[in-house]
Image (cartoon, rainbow, N blue to C red):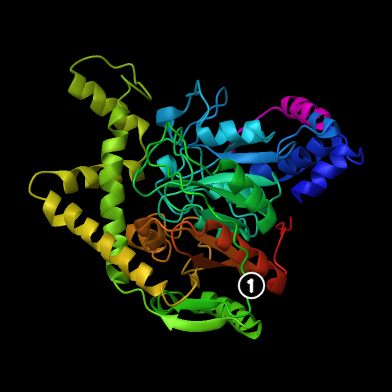
Amino acid sequence: MIQEIQRNLTEGRLDPESYVEAYYVRIERREAKVRAFITLRPMEEVIEEVKRSVERLRSGRHGRLEGILIAVKDNISTMGIRTTCGSKMLETYVPPFDATVIERIRREGGIIVGKTNMDEFAMGSTTETSYFGPTRNPWDLSRTPGGSSGGSGAALAAHFAELALGSDTGGSIRSPAAYNAVLGLKPSYGTVSRYGLIAYANSLEQIGPMARNANDLEVLYSVIAGPDERDATTVSAVLEKKEVRLNGLRLGVLDDMMEVSEKPVKSVVNDVLNKLSSEGSELKEVKLGYLDYALPAYYIIAMSEASSNLARYDGVRYGYSSGEEGLWTDVYSINRGAGFGWEVKRRIMLGSFMLSAGYYEMYYIKALKIRRLIYDNIASILKSVDLILSPTMPILPPKIGDVINDPIRLFAMDVNTVVANLAGVPAISVPAGFHNGLPVGLQAIGPYLSDYSLISFARELEKITGYRDLTAPE
């Protein structure tokens, strides 16, 4: 799709004005209901950037993303474009610098169309905790688009952009990918720079690509991946572009994740598994183990890191200020109380509690041990199979308001996705099908640094399902 757009722009079959206007017409028609964006750039600015891209395309000296419109999650720093994290705390913040991934996208000619809605500070699974209101799923406006990168997923499903960036701490790219019938990759930890990502939980989160087909996903990933001297957690290993063939591919199906998924989800996923088997793939039931402990371990680690990362937002050093004066303890409390939403405050308080004296070893250290056991089990499974498969999300997209006030149900939505973050391995969500018009995603997990193999698998899956470049009907 990207290459076709670039070819049409180069050869004059598509002029910059009509090209950009087509996206903005769709946005104007649907955005009031979908609410995918927090900040949308003026159309005139985008048109001017596309015109410059066309000149480069015609000169032959152009980037891989030249002229392509990209939606960016609103926790990724964009110089000169407001970056709020979906929070009142950063409602007026305009970064003076670009995140590394944005620098690389701009260098390759990519054009940012806007910043997408998200759960506040990426804390949520439905994009309902945003200070700016919830995003709605374009496939069914009564339902959530997943989270926390729900705005990015919805923008792709409504075809407001060709590509999108999200961030994934416990499934925040794969959840909206599954619920919006698009593709989303949580890269291997360290393959994509986090410089310029407003932190939630450093040891778990990664910026990753989202797209409407596997080829475009691969292009975006190839642009943003790579070491960065400004992020010491990035790795210098070379990622091999290994093509996957379904015939003879050994696939482990996670029985314990299938068990916790509801019947409609299992039914759709089983249909895809049958197609894979008919293509010659070898399917084998495997069990992760420790699944009952994965969610508690994940949330203990994530909340603990969040309590530290968000300590800087006090209205004095960073963030919303109420204008109150007095003792610093009182002013901090007022500013943080007014600037943060209820879900963020809950996670900060729980994280602070778990790091406090007397509870650190009881909770945090035990969570780290569980994390290691999960990594070991995934590594052990991947010795006998090439990829591990499961439903991306255990339930269909919930209706707006259904789970947001029930923390147990809200957290339980992440049960299938958190293990890849705990282990640091790559995972991708690919459209598997629909149940009564609602999208279902298939998750594939691979060995560390097998990111391109996962994208290749997604490309092969597209061929047998026919699900690519999907747009939700109006």
Residue 321 location, quadrant:
top left
Magenta-colored stretch includes residue 72: no
Total numbered labels: 1
Residue in view at x 87 percent, y 43 percent:
8
Q: Which residues are magenta?
A: 34-55
Q: Where does residue 454 sit, x and y in percent of width and height?
A: 56, 62
Badge 1 is on which residue?
245
Farthest residue, direction top? 325
Residue 24, above or below 173: above
Residue in view at x 47 percent, y 58 percent:
426
Q: Where does residue 285 sit, x and y in percent of width and height?
A: 44, 83
- Nearest to the observer: residue 196 or residue 37: 196
Is residue 4 in view from this perspective? yes
Dominant SS in magenta: helix
* Secondary structure beneath label 1: loop
Residue in view at x 63 percent, y 64 percent:
243
Is residue 389 in view from this perspective? no
Residue 44 shown left or right of residue 141 in the figure: right
Magenta-colored stretch includes residue 37: yes
Residue 311, above or below 428: above
Residue in view at x 85 percent, y 33 percent:
58
Residue 218 shown left or right of residue 250 in the figure: right
Position of the C terminus, as image quadrant, is bottom right
Q: Where does residue 322 sit, x and y in percent of width and height?
A: 34, 21
Q: Which kind of residue does numbered mark 1 sit on?
A: Arg
Residue 297, above or below 331: below
Q: Decide: few, some or many residues near mark 1? Use Cα within 10 Å; few <14, some 14-19, many ≥20.
A: some
